[in-house]
Structure formats: C-alpha cells, structure tokens
Amino acid sequence: MRPHMIRGTTRIERHRAPALLPAEWQRVGVRLSDSEPIHAALVSARSETTPEWDMHYGVELGLVMSGRMRRLWRSRQTELGPGQAWYCGIWERHGWQVLEAPCDHLVLVILPEVLLDPGLPAARQCDCLAPFRVEPERRPQVDGSLRQRVLATGQHIVGKLDLPDPMRQLWVRALSFELLLLLQKDWHPPAPQSVPTSGSFESFAEAMELVFRARRRVTTAEAAAACGMSTTTFTRSFTAATGISFARFSLRHRLGEAAAQLLQTSNTLETVSADWGFTDSSHFHRCFLRHYGRCPGAYRKTGRGDRGARSEASRGSSGKRR
C-alpha cells in the first residue's frame, strides 16, 4: 500500500513553481485557466513527514479532513486539526508537515482572477481574495461549531471529485465559493481597504503576460508602461490587488520556472540562471536559497531522487496512481 494517495485532477498548472513534495506526495500538477479556474484534490498522508515548502501563482485554500498537520509561512506557523483551514496567497512561500497520520486534507488551488469576479454582480461587493492578501496571522480562523459546518462542506467537495467534467468543475466551483463565504462569515479585514473591482486583474493583464512570456527580469517601469499607468500608480494598485509587489511577483515566477528546468534538464546552473535573467549563478543561488530554503544543486538532487523513487514504486505496483 502506498503511504500517501492523491485523489483529484491531474493536469499541469499553467503558471506555477513545482511543488516541493516527497515522492509519496507528488502531485502531477494542475492547469488553471478561465475554463477550469479551480483545482481540487484530496491528499491522504499515511505517515508523519518532515517540513516541505512550495509556492505558486494560484492562491491556495486548504482544509484538514482528518489527522493533524502543521502549516508554515515566513512569519507564522500553526497546528490544524479536522475542520480547520489555511490560506496561501499569490507566490507566497508556504510549508506543511504531517503531525498525526493518517491525515487527509483537501487542497484547492484557485486562479486569483476568478475570486475578484465570480460572474455575479453581488459577488463583487464581497472581497473573497482579501484573506489571501493579509498576513497569515490575520486570516480567518475556524473554531467552535463552525468547524463541523466547514468540515461538512469539505466532505461535500470531496464527494464530487470523481464526477466527470463538466459536472465536477461546476460542483467544485460552486462549493469552493460556499466554503470561502462560510469561512468569511464573521471575519473582516483587519483594516478598512477598498475592494478591487472586477477590472483590477484585467488592468494588470499585460504586465502579467509580459512576466509569463519573458525569460528575463521585467522591471516595474516596463510593466507599468505596458498597462498604460505611471510607475507609482501601478506599484500601489498591483500590490493592493494581489497582496504582493510586482518585483516579487516577477522574481518568484522566474524562480519557479528555473526550478522546473533544474528537474527537467541536465543544464548547468550557469545556463539555468542565464535562461531566467539572473545576473549570474551566484545571484541565482542566493535568490533560490532565500525562497526555497535549499540551494539549486540540493533541490535538483532531491527532486531527481524523488522521481526515481516514484519510478521504482510504479514498477512494483500493479495499481495506477491517481
């Protein structure tokens, strides 16, 4: 029996850093798009683990279904049990550790744009992206009787994961918003703030696409010009809407793509750093270590070891990985 199993969709995500997962946890990945803006998966951990880290473009909402786990961010860590949830923002480095197994947890990775404009006029007055923009310690907490209601909604989502498309997509989208609204029922942002309009991400679309297309550092001035804004207005508006500065957004995307290249090719660190616009391999090394918690060489070695372990596991089992 495999120590960890994953149930859910298995597509390659469009804009993401590769998940830093042990072999038993490895997700094939998800592709977020306008037609499929939410990826849902149930992860079943059958043993305790050491801390692992990840970051990606899509925001993440997670819910512990059974067992206990520790969630980690740069400024905070907390232990969660059944019915308790966590949030991760755009390109926010976050980690996890299973403390009590078996541990089942539901993971939703969501295209940020869809939270700002779900398609209903009334929904634009409810800022569903707000919890992902504030500091981890200020995000909604689940306590008391709310835990059972949240857990029931999570179980409802899990029950829809094996449906064929498009029914699965429709159910996951509807129930994900139900879960978000339930978690925000008695929560308010810590300070008054303007709610981004549905056009906010549209206003930044050119800057984001510039980042996704360019294999180099895109300056804030370039991005502002692409959006027809002054640098000051662009900087303030981008951070308010996404919860991350444009400079960090651009850097973390390049780090994610570089990390993927490390695992998928045998290119030297010098080549990888040059391919993604870093000044030199030393600069790449410092940035990578700061965000991933390990140097590029160690990341490549560990990642390839995990892939080898998965290959051995697949040869030794007649079942299919889900």
Image (cartoon, grey):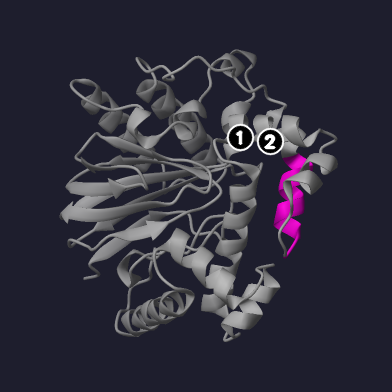
Q: Which residues are magenta?
A: 205-215
Please give the name of the residue rendered at 79% of the width and 40% of the height, measured from the top-left corner.
Answer: 224
Count of marks, rendered view? 2
Is residue 212 within the magenta segment?
Answer: yes
Please give the name of the residue rendered at 54% of the width and 59% of the height, measured from the top-left corner.
Answer: 11
Q: Amino acid at mark 1?
A: Thr
- Majority secondary structure of magenta residues: helix
Q: Residues within 10 Å of mark 1 (few under 14, many from 20)?
A: some
Look at the numbered discs 2 and 1 and tell me whether their residues touch, using CB distance below 8 Å. Answer: yes
Please give the name of the residue rendered at 19% of the width and 61% of the height, measured from the top-left corner.
Answer: 46
Q: Is residue 3 left or right of residue 160?
A: left
Q: Is residue 16 left or right of residue 158?
A: right
**Quadrant in which the N terminus appears:** bottom left
| Occupied quadrant, residue 264 | bottom right
Quick one: 289 or 164, which is closer to the camera?
A: 289
Q: Which residue is mark 2?
A: 235
Q: Which residue is mark 1?
A: 239
